[in-house]
Amino acid sequence: MTSESVDILVALRRQLEEALRKPKEKRRWVMVIDLKKCVGCNACTISCKAENILPPNVTYRPVLEEHLEENNRIGRRFLPRPCMQCDNPPCVRVCPVKATWKQADGIVVIDYNKCIGCRYCLTACPYGARSFDFGEYYTDQTPQFMPYENAPSWEYGERWVRQKNRSPVGNARKCHFCLHRVENGLLPACVSSCIGRATYFGDADGNTLVSQLIVSPRVMRLKEHLGTEPRVYYLL
């Protein structure tokens, strides 16, 4: 890791700590992803899986890949896709039991104990950013079940142990910007692990690095025409 990369992380961490001193409703968490820096290494995907102890087929931060061909040259382009934490989230509107909502700081959360597993929110999300926990394990149908698969996850600041018929099994699940880390002064796992320093996180209110990046002429957001007002910004 270069000294410049370390400096960016230090600055983001310091600004995160400053934002946490403000009331929750005064924070505006956003994520910025520089697509020119993303090399498709999937370090963010793997670190997210490890941080949140995610089971098979539950991925909070996939990296989408596009193959390009121009002037007889072939290339690839990568697009990390976390939850967009929309300001107008379609997933919230369709939940029949109000198990998902948008917090004052802008993060869309799920109450696993309220979720009934109807999966309406999965269908409503235009970004495909929600997964369903079917209770699968990586060591299913192998000679020995590995105990680490039941290691507790600390999502939303609570201790979750995956067991049959117990939350979060049977629930919708999604990226939450590593809320359990953020509220303890730590950057999301995907930000800390990005080898190209392509991902930035912070409070958009104030003189912060992310507040400067989101007004760049290079910035865009996915499917803005839908009116979802996503809080994930991309730099082209």
Image (cartoon, rainbow, N blue to C red):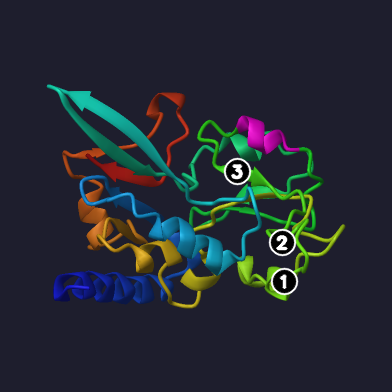
- Chief secondary structure of the magenta portion: helix
What is the CA distance from the residue labelled 3 to the residue labelled 2? 23 Å
145 displayed left or right of 67: right
Circles 1, 2 touching at the beta carbon (< 8 Å): yes
State the separation of the CA atoms marked 3 and 1.
Answer: 26 Å
Label 2 CA crowd tier, 10 Å (few <14, some 14–19, many 20+): few
Helix, strand or loop at disc 2?
loop
Q: Which residue is found at the position 52% from the left and 37% from the top?
A: 88
- Disc 3 or 1, which lies upstream in sequence? 3
Amino acid found under the numbered disc labelled 1? Met
Compared with residue 131, is residue 175 higher up or lower down, i.e. above or below? below
In the rendered view, tell whether residue 123 sits above or below residue 142.
above
Residue located beneath label 1 in the image: 146
Q: Earlier in the sequence, mark 1 or mark 2?
A: 2
From this viewpoint, is residue 140 visible?
yes
Q: Give residue 130's position: percent from left, percent from top.
A: 60, 43
Q: In this rendering, does residue 27 appear at all? A: no
Give SS at disc 1: loop
Q: Give the residue number, with chain letter if any, for mark 3.
A: 130
